[in-house]
Image (spheres, grey):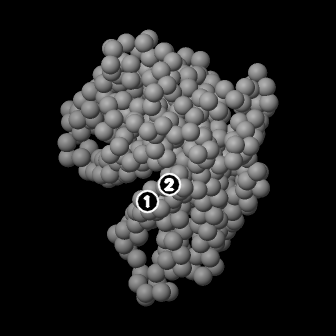
Amino acid sequence: MFPRWLVYVIFVHGVLSTSNTILEMMLNAVSLPLQAFFNESIYDHYGIVLDTQGMSLVVSMMPSLDLLGFFFSLLLAVPFMDSKGRRFVSVYVRVFSMILSSLAYVLAKYSNSIELYGVAQFLLGFVQPLKMIVVKIYLSECVPDRYRAFTALMVASCLIVPGFISTLLFLPSVFGNEESWQVVPKVCAGMEVLYLCLAAWLPESPKWLMDAEKPEEDVRKAIRFYHGEEENVAKVMRDIREEIDLGAHHRMSLWEVYQNETFRSIFKIIFAALLSSSLSMTCITQNYTQRLLLEYGYNVENSFLLTGVLQIALVPLLIVNPFLYERMGRRPLYLFSALCGIFQIFLLYGAQLITDINHGSNTVTFVLGTLSMVVNGIAGTTGLINAFIIFISDLLPPGAKVSVTQFVLLINLVVQIPAVFFFGNLLTLLGSWTFLPFLVLQILIFAYMFLYLPETKQLSVVSNIRRVEASLHHGSEESGKHEETTPLLTERKTYGT
């Protein structure tokens, strides 16, 4: 039976914690009022009137502050997952940072300070990795194995909520104007206070509690809450203990992960899924959607109409997808989404090639451009973007998650920033040739994942790791079903010692 508490957990962590997404949309949604604010603030403080180029520089600096906050969060906040707990980072650190960010936005408006606005952007970036992955890891460690991917993906699916909320809030007749844009951060701060009240009493991850050797009764309470009173608590504790013992250390460094043959193979799977996401057209072209559609025959009005229609049309798939991941499995859905990503590149390459040859658009480019946007939506909705988070939850013991998470998110920054930054210029210089390196890379990643990605649906992390280990040693996933309990590393810990 579907547990009622899971609906509450998804609502709290999925819907009420989306204020950061609303504020991330503000720079684009309220661009003209904010540009007027930037100009006025810089003139008051420095006596400079921004021209078009100067304003473009200021606006482009704001996302850079986001990225700087993201980087510092990886270094400072994410490691607290091990020392202070998953809930501490997911709830308290995230809420504190979000309220500070909202307060900085409000003070920036009332003090006419672009500097405070920059601080707010930095703090907003600080929140991003916490919401993007730490919350999902926290919840995936709490719920039973059969709901692990479902919970993480359903929380991700709740991002449609801030889209609808922001559409209302950012209307010029509501708060999307020069006088009232600061009301939006106030609303977001209120959402965070409500979230804190509803999330603070939820138990910590039972896996972290056991790994940190907290009182056994705390572990039992957490298991009874998340798994249900009817669950065999002793069996769940044995399973968690076995999972923790696979790592043998309270915290595994990235070097320790890579030294072990089994964990190295798992790391390669996660890394491949990350590259597939970071270098997908779904991620790269999200800042160039309108430009591409205009190039392929759309006008501004029709491009916005297509984007809006697709967002609405994909909502059912977004809701159904978490159920599919638990019923059909991770492997077929991920491979399907990866194929969609490859097909999208083919479509964009074809549309751009015809545009280059004809020096303009025609009916064929219009159709190919439309299809590319449809396939793009399907690829993103079915897991191309979030799959690496699922694989971290499915294939790593608690002690290895932090170091791997830090690394893959750092690589995500290092890879995606230049790819997104230079894509527009490359498209102007190289035309359709721009898509070919991405196409080759995605095909190679797909081939690797087709060969090595195991099926992990509704299995314990221990079973999944043993499957990978068995496939390495015996060339067969089926032999991974044995009940071997020897840790992959050398030490074995006992609970409470």
Question: What amino acid is at disc 1?
Answer: Leu
Q: Can residue 308 be seen in this view?
A: no
Q: Residue 60's x, y, as percent?
A: 40, 63
Residue at the image position 33 percent from the left and 21 percent from the top? 472
Q: Quickly name the residue at label 1.
A: 75
Q: How many labels does the image show?
A: 2
**Secondary structure beneath disc 2?**
loop
- Is 310 placed left or right of 410 in the picture? right
Q: Residue 301's x, y, as percent?
A: 51, 43
- Is 434 placed left or right of 236 in the picture? left
Q: Residue 213's x, y, as percent?
A: 61, 47
The quarter of the picture where residue 127 lies is bottom right
Residue at the image position 43 percent from the left and 88 percent from the top? 47
Circle 2 Cα neighbour tier, 10 Å, few/some/many (<14 / 14–19 / ≥20): many
On the rendered image, what quadrant is the C terminus found in?
top right
Question: What amino acid is at disc 2?
Answer: Val
Q: Are marks 1 and 2 in contact (CB under 8 Å)?
A: yes
Residue 78 is labelled as 2
Residue at the image position 42 percent from the left and 12 percent from the top? 479
